Image (tube, rainbow, N blue to C red):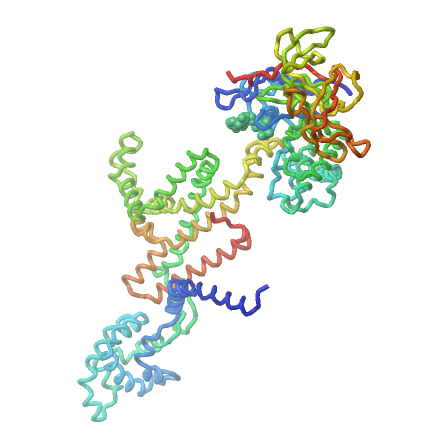
């Protein structure tokens, strides 16, 4: 028996060895995740740029417009924001609340200095600002600033769910032409389910074949499954383009056989079909490998036993083989489903317009529209959806039943 | 016991690879209600014979009949044969009751009757109260009982068992041997049982078929197999025998005189031998008299004691008779002392009837 202090020291040393790993997980996984979730609700830009203005905007406004203090404060703060280069982001965020406000704010920030002398002379900013832009006489402009000045906002999440707040602050649905994300989420869900089912339909017999073939054949088949796994995703996706495009191999073959007339070549790529085909191919190994590992552990003699007990091959499969392969089915399906729900590259390359998924929209907001808050909220919704599915799965099947390989 | 024929193998041959026979021209009749054991060394084709009967392997040539009907084209699930596999093959995702109900379910039996049958068969194998357990929650012996119960629950007339006790320890194995025998007697089913343990075969069987290289060497009740082995292989495989190789000098009245390395011996002539032919003599060690009065036996020699091993109920003595080394005799321990010492010269003898002249151990028959 070792003394307790010795054991504690050993545990400490073991913990110390694991420290780099913990740090790595934190830096590479938890920190970005936390950053993303923070961004989706935290928007300090306007609040930091216009603190005095926002304070003046609090409380009741008489006659629809804010008190004079607000005009004074914004006249003072806009030029400062311009100097600290915060005017662009600030204008963008206010503009998301009330379109047209971007130019109003940028223009005002630039011209305030010229009116400074008249302000010194006693003219109030309440009269001077409308000279720069009459938008300052509209309550909507000020409401937009006040709304954009909230540090914490549920706007991105509402937006991600096609919701909005009306003038009374009640949650309402977006007008029909602006409802895009819910439909996209649903499409992503359907595509993910479809890809999972396809992978299962192809992967189950394939894994069964590999698990029950002779050692040589089994190794060969496993290699065939794995080789695509090791080649670049881009190469594989491009290969599908070559195969499936209008002048591609498959269409050529169909035309040559006479199954399809030359002027009605099938469009199998840059649409949903392309997304389905390429994603199923890319994700198939994630289905086959867990299935194979589980199936290999099911003794062949069980099927013989079932037959000796009077079960025909169908009954033997349904009652004896399938239930024992379920942990593999569950693991493979969960893997494929979760991977495909966040899939990005393949739909982007071969999905065309109709084959885009939610991740492509997230990428769009990250890279093109630069609305990181919305991108983060969309990502957050996705994360929640996956977590919910995981919990449902755990309830129905049990995570401990998973066999990932 | 009624001896109507239940199963027949007619000149059955089996080859897995198309070039070597693992079963050569097997002829075998299994009687109804009989406990028949296939006994033989590893690789002698016992499992293959059993699997052909169960329907998991097809006979390459010949026919297998059950109740006179060829089962050539009958798939295993239509044969209605209970099979107990070596590693039980219980379904791990079902409870004990689920495993037992499975053959009844696939036969479309009503739940109430199913439950009653399951209960009855659990009582038969003495596992009452284990219905809700999973196979993984049972001991090896209990799993074994479930496997047997599952093979019996749909009331087959024929049950096959392939080394069902191989995974159990000795004590449990002996207990289960007795249990299986009891159950078989109680139900009156026909059992074809595979083992490579001759002790097990002796304890359980009505008849034992001794397999060697895909052939049956001899098929007889255990005591006949022990007392009257007809082939050198059987003499060696069942119990213990001194096997001496010699040449036939003369034949008379079912006995023969044999020259073994210059020593003449008298033996019961079992194989159809002719003068001048080689032969193998089989003598049981416990039928050898050591230090008895002279002239009691037809075979009577001087021998030297090389080695003595004390084994409780008997002494095992290794002797040399002239050039014949490693001749074994067993002396029952009746007096508490054997009366012989290493290096002693002793008299050694055995009756002609206890010395069986068999066909010389032939070359192993080469597959075609
Ligand atoms: N599926 C198979 N494919 C090819 N050869 C086989 C197959 N099964 C058995 N054999 C061969 O057939 C011969 C007889 O095998 P079998 O399993 O019948 O022997 P056994 O008497 O049951 O042996 P054991 O006591 O070791 O179980 C062996 O040489 C074995 O290698
Ligand atoms: Mg065997």
Q: Answer above or below: position of A35 versus B31.
A: below
Q: Image check: A203 left or right of A250?
A: right
Corner quadrant of residue A312: top right
On-image quarter of the N terminus of chain A? bottom right
Q: Nearer the viewer, residue B280 or B211?
A: B280
Q: Answer above or below: position of B242 versus A81.
A: above
User: Residue placed at 67% from the left, 23% from the top?
Assistant: B320
Corner quadrant of residue B56: top right
Q: Answer above or below: position of B330 versus B123.
A: above
Q: Nearer the viewer, residue B14 or B156?
A: B14
Name, please, the residue furthest toward the right.
Answer: B335
Q: Answer above or below: position of B357 versus B39.
A: above
Q: Nearer the viewer, residue B286 or A76?
A: B286
- In percent of width and height, residue A117 lies at 18, 90
Q: Image check: A366 left or right of A326?
A: left
The answer to whether residue B38 shows anywhere in this view is: no
- In percent of width and height, residue A198 lies at 42, 43
Report the label total. Answer: 0
Q: Image check: A116 left or right of B306?
A: left
The answer to whether residue A35 shows anywhere in this view is: yes
User: Residue placed at 19% from the left, 86% from the top?
Assistant: A115
Ligand 1, what quadrant?
Answer: top right
Q: Nearer the viewer, residue A124 or B87?
A: B87
- In percent of width and height, residue A134 lies at 24, 79
């Amino acid at each position: 028996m070792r003394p307790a202090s010795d054991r504690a020291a050993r545990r400490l040393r073991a913990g110390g060895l694991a420290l780099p790993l913990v740090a790595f997980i934190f830096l590479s996984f938890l920190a970005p995740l936390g950053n993303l979730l923070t961004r989706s609700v935290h928007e300090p830009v306007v609040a930091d740029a216009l603190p005095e203005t926002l304070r003046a905007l609090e409380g009741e406004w008489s006659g629809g417009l804010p008190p004079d203090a607000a005009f004074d404060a914004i006249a003072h703060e806009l030029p400062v924001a311009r100097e600290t280069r915060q005017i662009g982001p600030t204008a963008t965020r206010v503009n998301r609340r009330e379109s047209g406000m971007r130019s109003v704010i940028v223009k005002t920030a630039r011209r305030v200095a010229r009116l400074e002398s008249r302000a010194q002379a006693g003219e109030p900013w309440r009269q001077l600002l409308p000279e720069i832009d009459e938008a300052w006489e509209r309550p909507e402009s000020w409401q937009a600033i006040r709304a954009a000045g909230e540090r914490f906002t549920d706007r991105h999440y509402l937006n991600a769910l096609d919701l909005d707040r009306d003038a009374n602050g009640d949650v309402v649905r977006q007008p029909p032409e602006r409802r895009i994300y819910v439909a996209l989420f649903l499409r992503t869900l359907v595509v993910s389910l479809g890809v999972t089912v396809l992978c299962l339909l192809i992967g189950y017999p394939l894994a069964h074949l590999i698990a029950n073939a002779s050692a040589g054949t089994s190794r060969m088949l496993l290699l065939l499954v794995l080789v695509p796994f090791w080649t670049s995703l881009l190469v594989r996706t491009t290969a599908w383009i070559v195969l499936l495009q209008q002048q591609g191999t498959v269409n050529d073959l169909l035309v040559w056989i006479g199954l399809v007339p030359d002027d009605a070549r099938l469009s199998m790529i840059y649409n949903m079909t392309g997304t389905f085909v390429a994603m199923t191919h890319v994700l198939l190994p994630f289905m086959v490998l867990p299935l194979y590992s589980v199936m290999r552990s099911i003794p062949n003699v069980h099927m013989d036993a079932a037959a000796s007990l009077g079960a025909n091959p169908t009954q033997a499969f349904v009652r004896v083989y399938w239930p024992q392969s379920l942990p593999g089915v569950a693991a493979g399906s969960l893997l494929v489903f979760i991977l495909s729900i966040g899939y990005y590259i393949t739909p982007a390359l071969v999905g065309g317009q109709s084959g885009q998924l939610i991740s492509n929209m997230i990428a769009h907001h990250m890279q093109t529209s630069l609305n990181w808050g919305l991108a983060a909220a969309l990502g957050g919704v996705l994360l929640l959806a996956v977590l919910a599915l995981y919990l449902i799965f755990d309830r129905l099947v049990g995570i401990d039943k998973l066999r990932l390989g | 016991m009624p001896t109507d024929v239940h199963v027949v193998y007619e000149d059955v041959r089996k080859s897995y690879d198309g070039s070597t026979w693992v079963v050569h021209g097997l002829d075998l009749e299994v009687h109804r209600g009989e406990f028949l054991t296939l006994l033989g060394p590893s690789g002698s084709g016992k499992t293959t014979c059993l699997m052909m009967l169960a329907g998991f392997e097809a006979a390459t040539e010949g026919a297998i009949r059950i109740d006179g009907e060829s089962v050539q084209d009958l798939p295993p699930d239509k044969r209605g044969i209970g099979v107990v596999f070596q590693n039980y093959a219980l379904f791990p995702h079902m409870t004990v009751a689920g495993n037992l109900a499975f053959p009844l379910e696939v036969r479309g039996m009503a739940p109430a009757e199913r439950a009653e049958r399951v209960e009855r068969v659990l009582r038969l194998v003495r596992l009452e109260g284990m219905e809700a357990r999973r196979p993984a929650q049972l001991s090896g012996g209990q799993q074994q009982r479930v496997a047997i119960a599952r093979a019996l629950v749909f009331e087959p007339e024929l049950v096959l068992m392939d080394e069902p006790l191989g995974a159990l320890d000795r004590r449990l194995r002996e207990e289960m041997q007795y249990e299986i025998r009891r159950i078989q007697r109680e139900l009156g089913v026909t059992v074809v049982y595979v083992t490579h343990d001759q002790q097990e075969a002796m304890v359980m069987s009505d008849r034992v078929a001794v397999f060697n290289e895909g052939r049956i060497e001899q098929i007889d009740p255990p005591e006949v197999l022990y007392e009257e082995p007809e082939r050198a292989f059987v003499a060696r495989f069942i119990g213990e025998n001194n096997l001496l190789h010699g040449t036939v000098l003369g034949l008379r009245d079912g006995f023969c005189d044999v020259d073994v390395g210059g020593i003449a011996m008298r033996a019961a002539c079992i194989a159809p031998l002719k003068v001048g032919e080689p032969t193998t003599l089989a003598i049981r060690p416990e039928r050898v008299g050591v230090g008895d009065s002279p002239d009691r036996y037809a075979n009577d020699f001087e021998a030297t004691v090389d080695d003595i091993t004390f084994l409780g109920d008997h002494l095992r003595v290794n002797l040399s008779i002239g050039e014949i080394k490693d001749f074994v005799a067993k002396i029952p321990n009746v007096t508490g002392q054997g009366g012989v010492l290493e290096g002693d010269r002793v008299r050694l003898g055995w009756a002609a009837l206890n010395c069986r002249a068999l066909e010389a151990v032939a070359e192993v028959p080469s597959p075609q």
